[in-house]
Each structure stands twice: as C-alpha cells, then as structure tokens.
Amino acid sequence: MSLAFRTPDACPALVLNADFRPLSYFPLSLWSWQDALKAVFLDRVDVVAQYDTRVHSPKFEMRLPSVVSLRSYVNHARAPAFTRFNVFLRDSFACQYCGVTARESLTFDHVVPRSQGGRTTWENIVAACSACNIKKGGRTPREAKMFPAREPERPTMFELNERGRAFPPHYLHESWQDFLYWDCELEP
Ligand SMILES: [Zn+2]
C-alpha cells in the first residue's frame, strides 16, 4: 500500500522505544502528526521513516515522520488490551489452525463457538484464516477435529513486544494504517 498523498491527519507516527521496540501496543504506539513533530523539535525522538506527505510553514517544509524512536527508554508494565491487533499479534498474524499468514484474510475464531457458550476472551479467541473459520463453523475443536496450534491465553506485554520484534517496523506500520479498526476493544 502506498503512503503517498495522504492528508496530514492520516499520518500518525508509530512510536518505538529507545531500543526500537514499539513503545506499547495499547494505545497503539501511535501519535498524531502534531505530537510527532513536536517531539522531533524537542529532540525527544529520532525519525526512523517518513511519509511522502509534507507540511509547510513560512519557515520550513518537512515530510511527516511515519516511524519515530524515543531517545530515552520508557518502561511499560501494563496488561495488554484485548483488541484485534493484540490477538493477532499474540498469534503472530498466523491462522492457528493451518498456520497460513495471510494478513488480509485473517479473522478471529471463537474456539468454543458462541452458540455453545464460548465467550469473547483471550482464552477463547484465536486468529484464523477465513477458510478455516468457515470450515470449523459452529463446532468445537473436538467436533471439527481442528485444534489451535497454541492454547490461547492472555499474553503479557513482554510477550507481545517479543512477537512485535519479529516483524520489521514497516510491516507493523502498514498494518497500522487500519488502526481505527484494529484498535477496537473486542466486546466480551
Ligand atoms: Zn487456516
């Protein structure tokens, strides 16, 4: 997906910690372009990557940062939020039934289907490709003979950061273009 010709308001900056790990996954380590520019001018961050979109004032013109890294390390020990993005990140953007990593067709599956009392929780939601999701339908893993690769559980922030580290910043950044969709808290 091209990053060209975006309006400034569609140019959030992905914020990486001083060690180049994403600062956190909730909020999604995203700053508005205004906050990102302010941090650049205050020397709080280094610009890692930029959009093609430029902003102008009488005194300067610059491309908006798409990825910035903090100059000093920030420690976060919060529990990760239960969002689509974090569920997919926990599962490394891979279908837990067949292992395919097609981000575009990734959905989430209730391991125990809702029709059988399954809830929308860390322990009952896994990433699944749409083909597997359809195949499994409203059946339990035992009924469908389809078992998730990993027993789903609530990840720690550390685990999510480790998963995130496996992806280059631009990979995550592209997926964050849909951040309004990704960042919705899932309804229990
Ligand atoms: Zn699958």
Image (cartoon, rainbow, N blue to C red):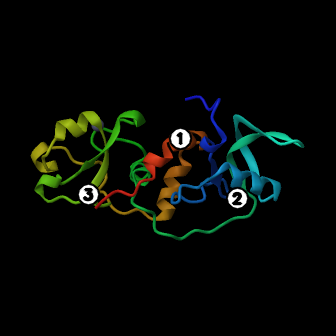
Residue ID for mark 1: 177
Residue ID for mark 2: 18
Label placed on residue 186: none
Residue 64 quadrant: top right
Marks 1/2: CA distance?
23 Å
Q: Secondary structure at mark 1?
A: helix
Query: Residue placed farthest to the right in the image?
Result: 59
Residue at x 39% of width, y 53% of height:
87
Label placed on residue 124: 3
Marks 2/3: CA distance?
34 Å
Q: Secondary structure at mark 2?
A: loop
For residue 54, above or below residue 41: above
Amino acid type at mark 3: Asn
Mark 1 and mark 2 lie on one chain; the one further toward the N terminus is 2
Q: Residues within 10 Å of mark 3 (few under 14, many from 20)?
A: some
Residue at x 28% of width, y 61% of height:
188
The residue nearer to you, when weighing 81 against 150, is 81
Residue at x 31% of width, y 53% of height:
150
For the residue with label 3, is its CB less than 8 Å from the closest atom of ligand 1?
no
Amino acid type at mark 2: Ala
